[in-house]
Image (spheres, rainbow, N blue to C red):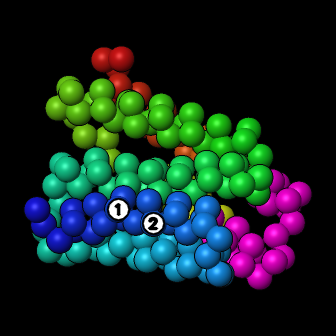
Amino acid sequence: MNIANKLTISRVLLVPFFIWFLFSEFYNKFFWCLILFLIAGITDKLDGVIARKCSQVTSFGEFADPLADKILNLSAFLCFVELGIISSIPVILILSRELIITSTRMMAIKQNKILSVNYLGKFKTLTQMSFIMLILLLKHINKANTYILNAIAWYVAFITLISGVVYMAKNRKILSFC
């Protein structure tokens, strides 16, 4: 297994620690969650850079990298819902989009087709990760406002849904086997 793929897997392995800190009574838990999430974000950036620069792009990496992002982000969103930080409805929309796109990519793989991530999908992931870090920062400094966080959650859900529609439209010819 190459370095890029190891970084992708490490991002998934950080998720249980993130969840544990988030639900613990640990002092400054939101700060430690923010640190863990930043580390995960750095691995997300590094795995792609290393894969491209060192010619380590693999089919596993092309599939696992966005999946690792989804596991990390959706875990955070679901925990935030459980903790009453944000509403479940935008999270359900985000989760639905992610499941549809991941299922579509899996069907394409069965047909020996790789549907790569586009720039809007990368922007969507950056938007989700930025929102998660904002929540963690605001909770850490005790400045979180539920109304504002929910408004931003709806914005993130909108970006997520738009990226899914564009992704499906862009790949409609490849997806004609569905």
Tell me the number on the disc at residue 17. 2
Q: Which residues are magenta?
A: 132-152
Instruction: Give the labeled residue for mark 1.
Output: 13
- Secondary element type, mark 2: helix
Name the quadrant containing residue 172. Answer: top left
Local packing at callout 2 (Cα closer than 10 Å; few below 14, some 14-19, many 20+) is few
Q: Is there any visible trace of residue 126 in the rendered image?
A: no
Q: Quadrant of the C terminus?
A: top left
Q: Residue at the location (57% across, 39% down)?
A: 95
The CA distance from mark 2 to mark 1 is: 8 Å
Q: Quadrant of the N terminus?
A: bottom left
Label 2 is placed on what type of residue? Phe
Q: Residue at the location (61% across, 76% down)?
A: 26
- Secondary element type, mark 1: helix
Name the quadrant containing residue 165. Answer: top right
Residue 36 x, y percent position in the rendering: 48, 74
Side (left or right) of 137 relative to 164? right
Label 1 is placed on what type of residue? Leu
Q: Is 136 in the magenta?
A: yes
Residue 115 x, y percent position in the rendering: 31, 41
Residue 32 x, y percent position in the rendering: 56, 79
Q: Is there any visible trace of residue 141 in the rendered image?
A: yes
Name the quadrant containing residue 147. Answer: bottom right
Q: Residue at the location (18% across, 49% down)?
A: 59
In this rendering, is residue 4 above or below 79?
Answer: below
Local packing at callout 1 (Cα closer than 10 Å; few below 14, some 14-19, many 20+) is some
